[in-house]
Amino acid sequence: MFDKSGQWLPLETFDDFDNGLTELIDLWSSEAKTATQQRKQAALAHYKADLEAATLEWAGNKAKSKKYAAIALELAEFEEVLVNGTGPAA
């Protein structure tokens, strides 16, 4: 996601997104001084933009688009927790 200098590293592969979502959740859970609200918001915005681009890129490939749709669903669940403080209804 971010390199040591604070620059965003674009996510390109499914593994980038899968690992990136874990890093994003870890960032939002972190209480480290470097995990500022601005950095958290920027990471979320970059992640969403990269995911949208990847989803559009693979729209014609059913297998890959399903993988990215699954990541998008996990991201939506995470955002719901951020907004409401709870996960999806069981």
Image (cartoon, rainbow, N blue to C red):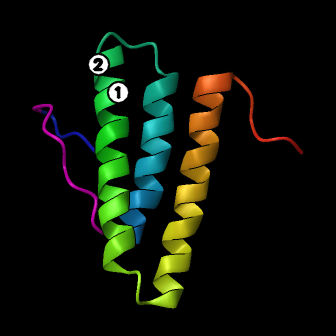
Instruction: Say which residue appears at 38% left-offset and 14% top-offset.
Output: 32
Residue 73 in picture, x, y percent from top left: 60, 56
Residue 5: x and y in percent read 10, 32
- Which residue is depicted at the point 52% across and 24% down? 29
Task: Give the structural element (helix, strand or loop) at label 1.
Answer: helix
* Quadrant hosting residue 82: top right
Q: Which residue is mark 2?
A: 38
- Name the mark on residue 41: 1
Do the residues under discs 2 and 1 have CB atoms within 8 angstroms? yes
Q: Position of residue 39 (x, y in %)?
A: 29, 24
Three-letter amino acid code of the residue under disc 2 = Gln
- Farthest residue to the top: give it: 33
Identified at 40% across, 89% down, the residue is 60
Magenta span: helix, strand or loop, mainly? loop
* Left or right: 32, with 81 as reference point: left
Spatial separation of the CA atoms under disc 2 and disc 1:
5 Å
Q: Which residues are magenta?
A: 5-13
Left or right: where 90 falls relative to 36: right
- Residue 86, quarter of the rendered image: top right
